[in-house]
Amino acid sequence: MSGTPPNAKDEEVAGFAAAWTTSIPLPHERCYPQVTAALGPERCAEWLGDAREVDELAGLPSARAEGLGSAPLAAVTESAPEHRCWLLTSARAEHALRFYRRVGWHRVTHPAPGSRDPVVFLSPLHPGATDTGPMASNL
């Protein structure tokens, strides 16, 4: 999904998102080992298995100011079965952390500040978002 804010040039892509269905067990590459360690294999299977993982969400700064980030995110998540979507981002990406909280995503891991471990979010209507107990927070 891409979009163009009113003030963007016609040939400029203002933002995009990419997502796919997660297989379990999670792969042993990228940040997946840290996700498995943080959530445990059972929660990974329950919350992330066969769920739609948002892998990329990007937008030009001018598009962010116009709220374009939420449109590509909705486009790749709205058709997910049972609203089961998740994503991970860097604990250092403060702008991304604020954005996901603002659009209703539920943070379910809390690495130490400045950590290189990823932060995992569940989508607003993900069934696990209501069963996250003390691990989750929208703070």
Image (cartoon, rainbow, N blue to C red):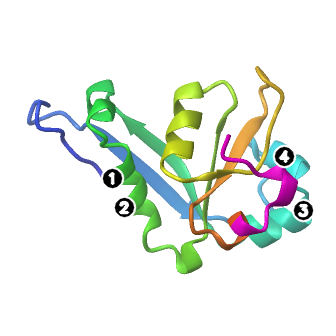
Whichever of callouts 3 and 2 sits on the residue coming sooner in the sequence is 3
For the residues labelled 3 and 1, the Cα–Cα distance comes to 32 Å
Q: Is residue 110 magenta?
A: no
Question: Of helix, strand and loop, which one carries label 3?
Answer: helix
Quadrant hosting residue 74: bottom left
Cβ atoms at labels 1 and 2 below 8 Å apart: yes
Q: Residue at x 84, y 46 (%)?
A: 33
Q: Which residue is mark 1?
A: 71
Whichever of callouts 2 and 4 sits on the residue coming sooner in the sequence is 4
The picture places residue 14, in percent across and down from the top left corner, at 26, 37
Q: Which residue is mark 4?
A: 33
Up-down: is 91 above or below 110? above
Query: Is residue 73 found left or right of 39 in the rendered image?
Result: left
For the residues labelled 3 and 2, the Cα–Cα distance comes to 29 Å
Q: Nearer the viewer, mark 1 or mark 4?
A: 1
Q: Main secondary structure of the magenta part?
A: loop
Query: Is residue 1 found left or right of 113 in the rendered image?
Result: left
Q: Which residue is mark 3?
A: 41
Range of magenta residues: 130-139
For the residues labelled 1 and 2, the Cα–Cα distance comes to 6 Å
Q: Amino acid at mark 3?
A: Pro
Q: Amino acid at mark 1?
A: Ala
Whichever of callouts 1 and 4 sits on the residue coming sooner in the sequence is 4
For the residues labelled 2 and 4, the Cα–Cα distance comes to 28 Å
The picture places residue 1, in percent across and down from the top left corner, at 32, 54
Q: Amino acid at mark 4?
A: Pro
Question: Of helix, strand and loop, which one carries label 1?
Answer: helix
Question: Residue 61, labelled with which disc?
Answer: none
Q: Which residue is mark 2?
A: 75
Query: Outermost residue toward the top?
Result: 114
